[in-house]
Amino acid sequence: SLTCFYASATCQEQFISRLIWLGSRSALGLDGMGEASWRALHQTHRFEHIFSWLTLTSAQIANTPGFAKGKSEQIWRQFNLARRQPFTRWIMAMDIPLTQAALQASGDRSWEQLLMRTEQHWRQLPATGERRAGRVIDWRNNLQIKALSRWLAAQHIPGFGS
């Protein structure tokens, strides 16, 4: 579902679920970031969207209630390491409706490349039929996804922007 990339009263649980997913090994691999950590950070710092944590300072993380010094330092390191993750990991974190194998097979290493792909291109990838290819096109054209891609470009995340 193409919802709850941005925090709102109606999306609280799905928003937290999205944060948990993006921190998982299947996406950005943020070690030590479980549900309790995401809830504490979001409750304290009121994230606008699923990538708002990228703007947190080490002091903000350290001042999050319930975070010991070691925990806050670990989170700060993980967030900084995430900035260097390859484009495909960020796209997985954005919940592209493709398998990792299909995304790797696409060869796309930038948002610009991804935008140029046709539905026919997507259909040729492993485990990607007509329906899934259509879902990729819908995902890519979604206003929230487009806004997040622009925001990631402004944060100098690899593959988003020049």
Image (cartoon, rainbow, N blue to C red):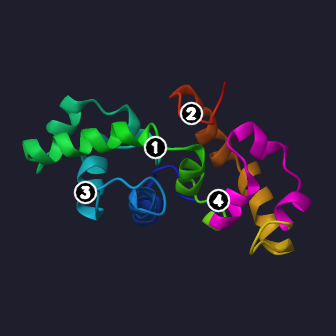
Secondary structure, mark 3, is loop
Question: Disc 4 vs disc 1: which is toward the camera?
Answer: 4
Q: Is residue 46 above or below residue 10?
A: above
Mark closest to the chain's N terminus, 3 or 4 = 3
Label 4 Cα crowd, 10 Å radius (few <14 / some 14-19 / many 20+): many
Residue 32's disc is 3
Viewed as shown, does residue 93 lie left or right of 9? Answer: right
Q: CA distance from mark 3 to mark 4?
A: 24 Å
Identify the residue under disc 1: 51
Q: Does residue 1 show up?
A: no
Which of the two discs, 3 and 2, labels the residue nearer the N terminus? 3
Image point (46%, 43%), residue name: 51
Q: Upstream in the sequence, badge 1 or badge 2?
A: 1
Task: Read off the magenta span.
Answer: 101-123
Q: Mark 4: which amino acid?
A: Ile
Which residue is disc 2 drawn over?
A: 151
List the residue tagged with mark 4.
96
Q: Give the amino acid at mark 2.
A: Trp
Q: Nearer the viewer, mark 2 or mark 4?
A: 4
Q: Residue shown at 67%/43% (left/top)?
A: 109
Image marks 1 and 2: residues in contact by CB distance under 8 Å: yes
- In the rendered image, residue 107 lying in the magenta stretch gets the answer yes
Alpha carbon distance from label 2 to label 4 = 17 Å
Pointer 3 with pointer 2, Cβ within 8 A: no
Query: Dot 3: within a 10 Å radius of its alpha carbon, few (fewer than 14), some, or many (20 or more) residues?
Result: few
Mark in front: 3 vs 2? 3
